[in-house]
């Protein structure tokens, strides 16, 4: 779709996320309902019935949208910001995970320490060797 609007061509695409951010119905192309062959056929007829001037204007509007919204440097900046946000969220998660692991490690060492102390302080059960089972 981006290549088509960058080349000043009207587009037909489904009215779905990702597509509707590129195509504005009646402005630079036509949106059709997903899985609707009749709607697709109607949009194709609309494009075929456009005058040359309407088709050229629709194409120029698509090019304007491509340049304004999808310039490479803009898209790269958006990707970098999203990567930074993801890295920040992941580093927070890693810090929280490391803190939890440290607490678990401390607790497990403390528990083992308590178990060994309690086992030392408790009296073993007497064993009677004289009785037979």
Image (tube, rainbow, N blue to C red):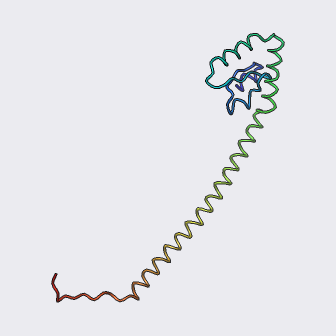
Q: Position of residue 99 (x, y in %)?
A: 60, 66
Closer to us: 125 or 8: 125
Q: Nearer the viewer, residue 64 or 77?
A: 64
**Which residue is painted at 70% across and 49% down in the image?**
84
Quadrant housing residue 79: top right
Residue ID at (22%, 88%): 128
The residue under the point 66% across, 52% down is: 87
> Quadrant location of the N terminus?
top right
Image vertical order of residue 101 relative to residue 28, above or below: below
Image position of 95 with respect to 76: above or below: below
Q: In this view, does 52 lie to the left or right of 31?
A: right
36 and 25: which is toward the camera: 36
The C terminus: image quadrant: bottom left
Residue 56 or 41: which is nearer the viewer?
41
Q: Is residue 111 left or right of residue 99?
A: left
Q: Is residue 8 above or below residue 89?
A: above
Q: How many labels does the image show?
A: 0
Q: In the shown orientation, is residue 35 left or right of residue 124?
A: right
Give percent across and percent down for residue 41.
66, 15
- The image quarter containing residue 129 is bottom left
Residue at 77% across / 26% down in the picture? 24
Q: Position of residue 20 (x, y in %)?
A: 72, 30
Check the image and report above or below for 68 versus 8.
below
């Amino acid at each position: 779709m981006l290549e088509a609007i960058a080349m000043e061509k009207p587009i037909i695409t489904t009215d779905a996320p990702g597509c509707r951010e590129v195509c504005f119905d009646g402005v630079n192309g036509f949106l059709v309902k997903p899985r609707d062959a009749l709607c697709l056929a109607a949009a194709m007829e609309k494009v075929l019935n456009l005058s040359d001037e309407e088709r050229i204007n629709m194409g120029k509007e698509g090019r304007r949208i491509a340049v304004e919204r999808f310039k490479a440097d803009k898209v790269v900046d958006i990707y970098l910001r999203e990567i930074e946000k993801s890295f920040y969220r992941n580093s927070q998660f890693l810090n929280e995970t490391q803190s939890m692991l440290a607490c678990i490690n401390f607790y497990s060492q403390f528990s083992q320490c308590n178990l060994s102390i309690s086992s030392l302080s408790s009296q073993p059960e007497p064993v009677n060797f004289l009785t037979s089972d």
